[in-house]
Amino acid sequence: MSHCVGLVTGRQESGHPFRLHRGYAFAVDPDDTLGARPEPEAAGGLLGSAAFRPVRAGNAFEETVERVLQVIKLGLVAHGERLPSERDLAGRLNVSRDTLREALHSLQRAGYVESRRGRYGGTFVTYRQPAPQPGALRKAVQGLGSGDLEDALTYRLVLETGAAEAAARRTLSDSQRSGLRRHLADLESVPADRYRQSDTRFHLAVAELTGSPSLVASLAEARLRLNDLLDAIPILERNIDHSAVQHRAMAEAILAGDAEAARRATEEHLEATAALLRGFLG
Amino acid sequence: MSHCVGLVTGRQESGHPFRLHRGYAFAVDPDDTLGARPEPEAAGGLLGSAAFRPVRAGNAFEETVERVLQVIKLGLVAHGERLPSERDLAGRLNVSRDTLREALHSLQRAGYVESRRGRYGGTFVTYRQPAPQPGALRKAVQGLGSGDLEDALTYRLVLETGAAEAAARRTLSDSQRSGLRRHLADLESVPADRYRQSDTRFHLAVAELTGSPSLVASLAEARLRLNDLLDAIPILERNIDHSAVQHRAMAEAILAGDAEAARRATEEHLEATAALLRGFLG
DNA sequence: CCGCAATGGACGTCCACTCGTCCATTGATC
DNA sequence: GATCAATGGACGAGTGGACGTCCATTGCGG
């Protein structure tokens, strides 16, 4: 797939409903006190698909392309910046260097990165976030199942509000405090075409303050799943102004250690986006 | 682990885009003086390790063993119950049947499962949760880094409270409501040696009510990471009674649609466990 | 100017994993 | 008792990915 770089919209849960015809049951418990246990077919439903979800989403190459692409699209490594060296990056991603190189070549062909040899060389990001096309949003939203959208929105809401609250509860070091302020300032001064990147960095910075790597990783993943949608939303001055107020409220609540306020501010902040996206579902 | 402080010269609008002296964008800096501008070291620190986290944790065999073992230890498929057929399960986990079989054989040798051939045969769980050994908890906790424990506890708190709140906000169907009540009743009647399983099922059932598969999956993962620790905690009557009150409060708040109360009840519920585990860190 | 060090580039080898296919076993059903 | 469908069991061929090693390029340091 030469154009593997397209939006591989993440997980495609193959929803196998369990076939429950007759004796087939996950409940062949001899001492089963019929009915006492809530779900003899314990592993059915959502629970089953979560428990037995795929061990790996695709082949190493695809997943590697996806990962690097996401980092680029999230703006974690922005235009002109350099990715870690192939050896380093391959180690971090836990894939062979060959596989990583294939992925990078693929991204290079697609125009996302560029490699230069020699010491102080490396692989540099050439991608710039394109201006959103009219109609792109509707298409992007409809490309997702409505279930997927709700899933992503719920997931994100839980993680973001939880992160904000947890961050507010921590006692922050001076450098952490000033770091957060700097992110906030950056958010308020960045040109519109880089707004989304700064926004992402701000939110991830909040998650980082919790000190929980798992939380950061999950939040990054949640954002990634909405990223294509968010990219399709035209950045309006009004939205930015509106967001700015909320971002400030979040930051101040976190710095003040007011968990409740941090949660509320975050929730309001996300609600606007969520409402907008849901509007394209009808 | 290397942290990084990129020395990429700020934002370049044009001309000589990237001038990087020893422009390693991903250097090593444990303290990560986030002091600098938010951008250059964008992918450093937690953020970098989250963004470039391993694409795959290990080989397919290991991950498969791990996955199935977790399902068993969580009690999602309890003693005497049957796992999905090899063909089915391999498909769900997205590994070859051979790999799955190897994993199952490995589990069989370890005494977790048992396979029977023929129609209506299958692979059955033979594992029973052992009674906790005195001193096991301290060892288990210390086996984890203190950072790991905090990470897991924070992650779990965020997900569980968020799930409870989100569940309370949904309008639930009759079957969902009665399902939750059944879980609650089960929790209050189950013998002590099955308490943890019922507890897990109850909490996952709450997550299921949110309708967000991602949330269920993450919560399952979060619980898994604490599972060995929880297993090492002796189940005391007093704890069960205490938990029962909180479980009931959670369920009632969710059924009543009271998001705030659901969150609070969940938080209190988890706090007890968290405090206990933290006590073993000194 | 030279040499060094760190980078991307390339290749041969080996093994884990997959895929397809067939066999062996079992118990419900007729 | 015979049949049949679904299950675990096994094997050979094909391949994707990992590993080690080497080469080519580049710019900084001496």
Image (cartoon, coloured by chain):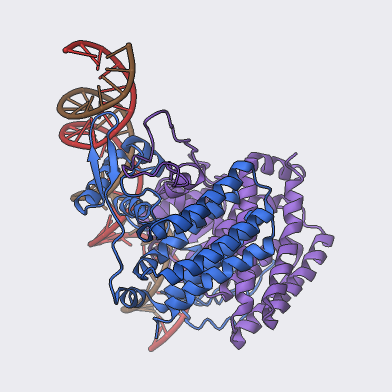
Chain colours: A purple, B blue, C brown, D red
Front residue of A216/B48: it is A216
In the visual, does A145 lie left or right of A120? Answer: right
In the rendered image of this protein, does residue A19 appear above or below residue C1?
above
In the visual, does C16 lie left or right of A241? Answer: left
The residue shown at (59%, 55%) is A224
In the rendered image of this protein, does residue B202 appear above or below residue B225?
above
Corner quadrant of residue A253:
bottom right
Q: Position of residue A151 (x, y in %)?
A: 61, 49
Q: Position of residue A192 (x, y in %)?
A: 76, 63
Residue A216 visible in this rendered orientation of the protein:
no
Corner quadrant of residue A6:
top right
Q: Position of residue A272 (x, y in %)?
A: 76, 57
Residue A228 visible in this rendered orientation of the protein:
yes
Q: Position of residue B236 (x, y in %)?
A: 39, 70
The residue shown at (39%, 67%) is B230
Q: Quadrant of the N terminus of chain B?
A: bottom left
In the rendered image of this protein, does residue D9 appear above or below residue A173?
above
In the visual, does A188 lie left or right of A172? Answer: right
The residue shown at (44%, 46%) is A36
Residue positioned most to the right: A238
The residue shown at (36%, 44%) is A32
Corner quadrant of residue A90:
bottom left
Total labels: the figure holds 0
Q: Quadrant of the C terminus of chain B?
A: bottom left
